[in-house]
Image (cartoon, rainbow, N blue to C red):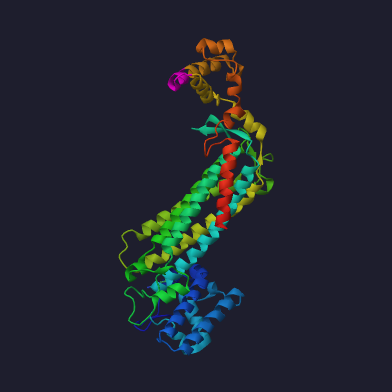
Amino acid sequence: MKLWGGRFTKKTARETSQFLDSLRFDARLYKEDIKGSIAHARMLGRQGIITPDEADLLVNGLMEILEEIKEGKLNPADGMEEDIHSFIEARLVEKVGDVGKKLHTARSRNDQVATDFRLYLKGEISDLNLLLMQLISALVERAEKTKEIIMPGYTHLQRAQPITFAHHLLAYCEMLRRDCGRLKDCYCRMDYSPLGAGALAGTTFPVSREDVARELGFSGICRNTLDAVSDRDFACEFLFDLSLIMMHLSRFCEELILWSSSEFGFVEMDDAYTTGSSIMPQKKNPDVAELVRGKTGRVYGDLIAMLTLLKGLPLAYNKDLQEDKELVFDAVDTVKSCVEILIPLVETLKVNKERMYQAAGGDFTNATDLADYLVRKGIPFREAHGIVGQIVLHCIQEKKRLEELPLEVYQQYCSAFEQDLYDYIDIAACVSRRRVPGGPAPKSVEKELEELKQWLDVQR
Ligand code: ARG
């Protein structure tokens, strides 16, 4: 069944329909579409726009269609209609007869699709939040067991100062926590109902937009009918949030890839989450992490495509807007699959604490602590920095570590050095001293972990 055609004398060309139809991808909005139609039909009945009996017929018909789809008896994607809205309406008319044709009173597909899309994304945000929480939990669990594992912290990919592995994992927890917060914000801003905006200028029927909004679980109505049908800010925001999630995941994956190279040897991914080579029998490749990193590009692409699609688009509805769905669906499917696969990958990650510890002690990562040592003996920091710099240079020339240099040599550079310097620059001591809130010391990590676990509890 076509929803229009009265003013046409010719049939639509097959290639036109093929080009324009969206059912093959918007079929996934069937639940939201039916939910929206049920709320609309009930409201039409309550407001006396149709009779209560007619409303009941529509609602029951719609519920049956929903059941049939859920049970697999009916597959919207197989339909011949233009889009999911036409598909559901056609099935309704088949089921309940002519009264089905009253459903679209005081409504347009423009406010309908905007409503469906918002409802759908609200659901996706909730699902995604749960997944992110699971990933955070997996990281928290690994952090609890790696509080004492010392690794080098880097700047410029050069060893800088020693930290704990748990601290590194907690950095990602913070990113993901902000991601959850952003999704929540996005949810709040999209939580308004477009229904009642009609095609663009509302309706002449005495609808109750507020009732429909309430029944659909929206926190209110879109305040302007033109904006209601043409706004896709919420989709842009959502895509931006997804892009940041991917950016965080790709940074994590990049580190996992680096760390699992034999040059680093810090971690080993479980066989179940790695792959081999068709030619090189010895290989174990971090394909999962690489593909997550790679998929980041396509999510960014979806965001840029969405912004570009909206740029300069006049009010109100234009068919361009139909492009919104594939972009968002692609992005949300991608992000969910990435988060899903990273959860077990994190849970099964093997950590090589000996390698990490060994690496943490190289490249003078305790030089800052040696300077701090002098500061504690009364030397101004800038001066201490200079003295330690000279000592490091000496060590490089002599191929020695700071720990290996005799006290007499230290004292040639500064008389403030005493025997206790050796304990002071021990790598474990350097880490445990970094007890600032949010710092890498096991004590600080413990506090952060407590806070994170409380946060997780509150979210659940
Ligand atoms: N399939 C359309 C979309 O996704 C539904 C809205 C159609 N409205 C219209 N005026 N052609 O945007």
Q: Is residue 423 visible?
A: yes
Q: Is residue 274 above or below residue 113?
A: above
Indicate the position of residue 91 as horizontal and vertical percent values. Answer: 51, 81
In the image, 218 versus 305, the foreground residue is 218
- Is 417 left, or right, of 357 in this rendering? left
Indicate the position of residue 331 as horizontal and vertical percent values. Answer: 49, 57
Q: Is residue 457 above or below residue 255?
A: below
Q: Is residue 72 above or below residue 254?
A: below
Predominant secondary structure, magenta span: helix
Q: Is residue 374 magenta?
A: no
In the image, 1 versus 447, the foreground residue is 447
- Is 163 left, or right, of 111 in this rendering? right
Q: Quadrant of ligand 1?
A: bottom left
- Is 375 left, or right, of 309 in this rendering? right
Segment colored magenta? 378-386
In the image, 162 versus 251, the foreground residue is 162
Where residue 195 sits, quadrant-wise, is bottom left
In the image, 79 versus 286, the foreground residue is 286
Q: Is residue 264 visible?
A: no
Q: Is residue 379 magenta?
A: yes
Q: Is residue 414 above or below residue 40?
A: above
Indicate the position of residue 321 as horizontal and vertical percent values. Answer: 39, 65
Quarter occupied by the C terminus:
bottom right
- Determine the residue positioned at 32% across, 62% down: 313
- Determine the residue positioned at 69% across, 41% down: 281
Where residue 159 sits, quadrant-wise, is top right
- Determine the residue positioned at 68% across, 49% down: 272
